Amino acid sequence: MLRRPDLGLAVRNHPNLLGKISSAAQALGHQSPQINKNAMIKEILKSQQKQSGVKVGSSDSSSSMSGIGYILLLLSSLLLLIGWFGSWMPDNNNTTTTTPMPSTSSTSSSTEAPIADKYGCSFGFQGRLCDPCGVQTVKPDVKIVGGVDAVPHSWPFQALLAYSYVANVTIPGTNVTQMYSDTNRFICGGALITRDTVLTAAHCIDDLTSSFIVEYNSSYYWYSTVPNQYYPTLASRYSVYLGAHNKTAALNGVAPAIKVPVVYVQVHPEYNLDGKMLNDIAILKLAYEVTLNSNIQLACLPDPSIPHYPTNYGVDTYAMGWGTTEQGGNTSDILQNVVLELLNGPTQCYPDNQDQFNWNTQVCSGILAGGKDTCQGDSGGPLYILDTVPDQNGTNVQKYIEIGIVSYGPGCANAGYPGLYTRVSGYHKFIQEFI
């Protein structure tokens, strides 16, 4: 079911090109003995990050473009295949600039000393008011063998990220001015970690919304998203919905979901510096502290005294989102959840391509046999495990702890292709600095 973003030529409303390339690569691997399948997997993984025109980002297929989008996607696929055989590919970095941050050394090493909570809260309590995390009044349905509709409001930590942008653009070589409008579109998931802070993926900000396409006289023109009179700041383009279960209902203002403006965006300063999709984490600060209730609660962060968490593999993980329920399909209106497995990165996840990963800052989760996964539109959403967390009385109780952020992966639910997630425990310092 569920998995990360589509690879999208900044065409954000299309099926997963990466999945198509992955499938094509596998097909070629079976048809031609001259092709090294492991090398091709490595190129697939690399290709997700190093092209500015071909970047990862969530999709909402419910608002698809015309056939030209698919043509562009197929062209991109062809370019990638040409790159494999001819070592040619343009590298035009065109990323959105984020709000400047104070200097930080958050390189996220697993040997980093424990970071004290910014507000002096003990583990299990978060934010300015040291609210207890992981509070659930509705029991989730986790005894499942595949992705299913979540029990309404059983994941009150879930956030829905929406994007808006309007611009007046001039068509090159003409005096024609045309208005581009893309408003209140679902792009990613996230998790509420304090009353005014949402944790999501950096690529939801830097890659997914950095450019757009305008059609004029059957031609298509690319533009970068820049501040303008309609959206003067990066943060002004984003809104977060909390308490949502039905995506469309939430976007249309139906209670109990609430819409909260974003006032500050902080992408990790070292996101994707080496082209390996590392440090795929971002923080969104909300316009105000929301009221916690049965539909809106805080996700538990890992215990900061454990720098490399979780410490065990083979345990169940839990993912949820409004992404597609199959590769290339439509996003889901109803929040989905699925049970996966936490895999041992060095031995179970792309063992012949280990140079692409940093297991201090990434985790691998999925089902090696295939059939269950996160998928397009789930980017930025949380990955949980069930573990003990102290309650108000100091008693250890079972709660869901966010261990990962949906990042990327080739295709969706394909055997041997598990998903990659940002390891939350590798970013205690970064999170505490901007929480």
Image (cartoon, grey):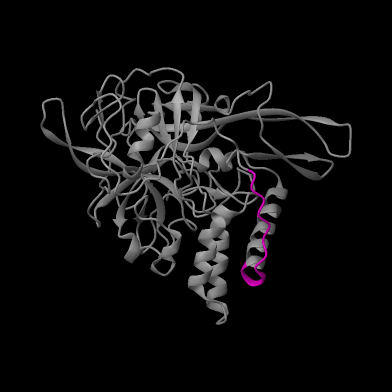
Residue 435 in the image: above or below residue 9? above
Q: Is residue 174 visible?
A: yes
- Using residue 221 as the reference point, say whether residue 285 is left or right of it: left
**Foreground pick, 306 / 394:** 306
- Where, quadrant-wise, is the C terminus in this rendering? top left
**Foreground pick, 105 / 290:** 105
Residue 435 in the image: above or below residue 348? above
- What is the quadrant of residue 394 in the picture? top left
Q: Which residues are magenta?
A: 84-94
Residue most extreme to the bottom:
33
- What is the quadrant of residue 115 in the picture? top left
Q: Residue at x 46, y 45 (%)?
A: 280
- Asked if residue 85 is among those painted magenta in the image, a careful observer would answer yes
Magenta part mainly helix, strand or loop?
loop
Q: Count the numbered circles shown.
A: 0
Q: Position of residue 48 (x, y in %)?
A: 55, 54
Residue 405 in the image: above or below residue 175? below
Q: Position of residue 182 (x, y in %)?
A: 64, 31
- Using residue 283 as the reference point, say whether residue 11 is left or right of it: right
Q: Position of residue 202 (x, y in %)?
A: 49, 41
Residue 288 in the image: above or below residue 200? above
- Using residue 420 as the reference point, say whether residue 60 is left or right of it: right
Q: Residue at x 46, y 30 (%)?
A: 102
Q: Position of residue 228 (x, y in %)?
A: 68, 25
Q: Is residue 184 visible?
A: no
- Asked if residue 61 is among those painted magenta in the image, a careful observer would answer no
Q: Residue at x 50, y 66 (%)?
A: 41
